[in-house]
Image (tube, helix red, strand yellow):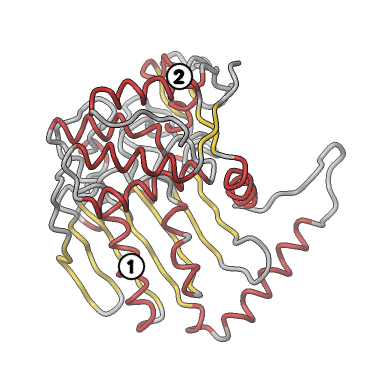
């Protein structure tokens, strides 16, 4: 396999910003989106970072994304709100929702904010982590942007990967950050495998005869498998109802496949639940208790052959630190695609400063 080229966070961020701004996004919005996209790559969520840029550009060019959205609250009470994203970039819509949830939780102790008419917004953990800076924890739910999952035992793809993420603050340990699809693998991982020229492992997808599907380039010939078989199917359904239906966003057969359709409004739904630790006592006491539990789990007895027990978010935390110092790896095939895009957009190619 060809070795990857590494880029700094700033190099990826600036390239993304220039690409989005070239298509008419206001500079502040292009900067915000590019920061979040590059952060996805920084934490190793390479299925949701710069790899998505060509797809976003196609939707912008086709009119499938509103470049000048009027993001607004359409329903509101003291501890909840529904945000209408006006079909803007999902990163902008969800960031707005999280900021609002943090503000409301600081007053009410807890807040739930839903989005509708949003778009794909990158990895869930970007948003469940944001409340940590305020001594709050975050729970994030989303409806995926394409249906790749049938009901358990069925073949009609009526559900998506519908991810869940939780960000739990700590004192000295890395924060506990769970980010998981309700399928064995998120579809972004399938796309990343295809970009790298790699095959998928058994258990990610099956074809319509129920046989393992290993070639990511043939993903449209089958569907993803849920975690825990029927339990994962049930979880995907509930997450979709909470993140989509509750806020007035698309769910089920109304979900638009944004991989294939660059024009239609996706009406993507997300939801963020923020809890202020101070509403339950001293935040430092809570964080020290989490630290202790993290250490107990990490240092617990391991099975033979197991070198380390990982906590959710630790590997992403290590990648953040390593990539910050050593650079973010990008596959050669993706670099080539991005530089073709750069030429089309009339911006500088993805090269080192």
Residue 210 seen from this side? yes
Q: Where residue 159 sits: x, y (%)?
A: 34, 37
Quick one: 122 or 343, which is closer to the camera? 343
Crowd rating for badge 2 (residues with CA inside 10 Å; few <14, some 14–19, many 20+): some
Quick one: 205 or 267, which is closer to the camera? 267
Residue 231 seen from this side? no
Q: Is residue 165 above or below residue 230?
A: below
Q: Where residue 318 sits: x, y (%)?
A: 64, 48
Q: Where residue 346 sits: x, y (%)?
A: 23, 28
Mark closer to the observer (2, 1)? 2
**At 53% from the left edge and 38% from the top edge, which residue is drawn?**
227
Quick one: 343 or 291, which is closer to the camera? 343
Circle 2 sits in a helix, a strand or a loop, which is it? helix
**At 48% from the left edge and 45% from the top edge, which residue is drawn?**
9
Q: Is residue 298 above or below residue 227?
A: below
Q: Where residue 252 sits: x, y (%)?
A: 27, 39
Quadrant of the image for the N terminus?
Answer: top right
Q: Is residue 1 left or right of residue 105?
A: right
Q: Is residue 39 above or below residue 286?
A: above
Measure how far apart labels 2 and 1 are at the Cα level: 36 Å
N-terminal of the pair, mark 2 or mark 1, is 1
Residue beneath label 1, please? 99
Residue beneath label 2, please? 333
């Amino acid at each position: 396999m060809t070795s990857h080229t590494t880029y700094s966070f700033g190099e990826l961020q600036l390239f993304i910003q220039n690409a989005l701004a070239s298509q008419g996004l206001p500079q502040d919005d292009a900067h915000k989106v590019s920061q979040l996209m590059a952060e996805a790559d920084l934490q190793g969520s390479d299925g949701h970072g710069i790899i998505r840029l060509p797809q976003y550009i196609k939707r912008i060019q086709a009119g499938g994304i509103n470049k000048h959205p009027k993001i607004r609250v359409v329903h509101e009470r003291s501890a909840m709100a529904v945000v209408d994203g006006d079909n803007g970039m999902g990163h902008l819509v969800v960031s707005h929702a999280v900021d609002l949830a943090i503000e409301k939780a600081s007053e009410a102790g807890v807040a739930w904010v839903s989005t509708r008419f949003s778009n794909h917004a990158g990895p869930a953990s970007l948003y469940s982590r944001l409340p940590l800076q305020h001594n709050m924890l975050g729970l994030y739910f989303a409806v995926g942007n394409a249906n790749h999952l049938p009901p358990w035992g069925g073949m009609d793809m009526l559900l998506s990967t519908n991810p869940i993420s939780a960000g739990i603050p700590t004192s000295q340990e890395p924060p506990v950050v769970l980010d998981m699809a309700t399928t064995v693998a998120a579809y972004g991982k399938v796309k990343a495998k295809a970009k790298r020229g790699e095959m998928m492992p058994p258990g990610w997808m099956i074809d319509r005869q129920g046989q393992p599907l290993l070639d990511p380039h043939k993903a449209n010939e089958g569907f993803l498998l849920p975690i825990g078989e029927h339990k994962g199917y049930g979880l995907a359904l509930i997450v979709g109802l909470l993140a989509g239906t509750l806020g007035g966003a698309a769910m089920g057969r109304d979900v638009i496949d944004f991989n294939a359709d660059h024009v239609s409004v996706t009406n993507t739904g997300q939801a963020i639940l923020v809890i202020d630790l101070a509403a339950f006592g001293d935040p430092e006491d809570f964080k020290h208790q989490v630290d202790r539990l993290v250490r107990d789990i990490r240092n617990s007895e391991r099975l033979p052959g197991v070198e380390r027990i990982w906590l959710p978010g630790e590997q992403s935390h290590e990648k953040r630190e390593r990539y910050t110092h050593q650079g973010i790896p990008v596959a050669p095939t993706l670099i080539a695609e991005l530089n073709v895009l750069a030429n089309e957009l009339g911006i500088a190619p993805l090269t080192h400063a």
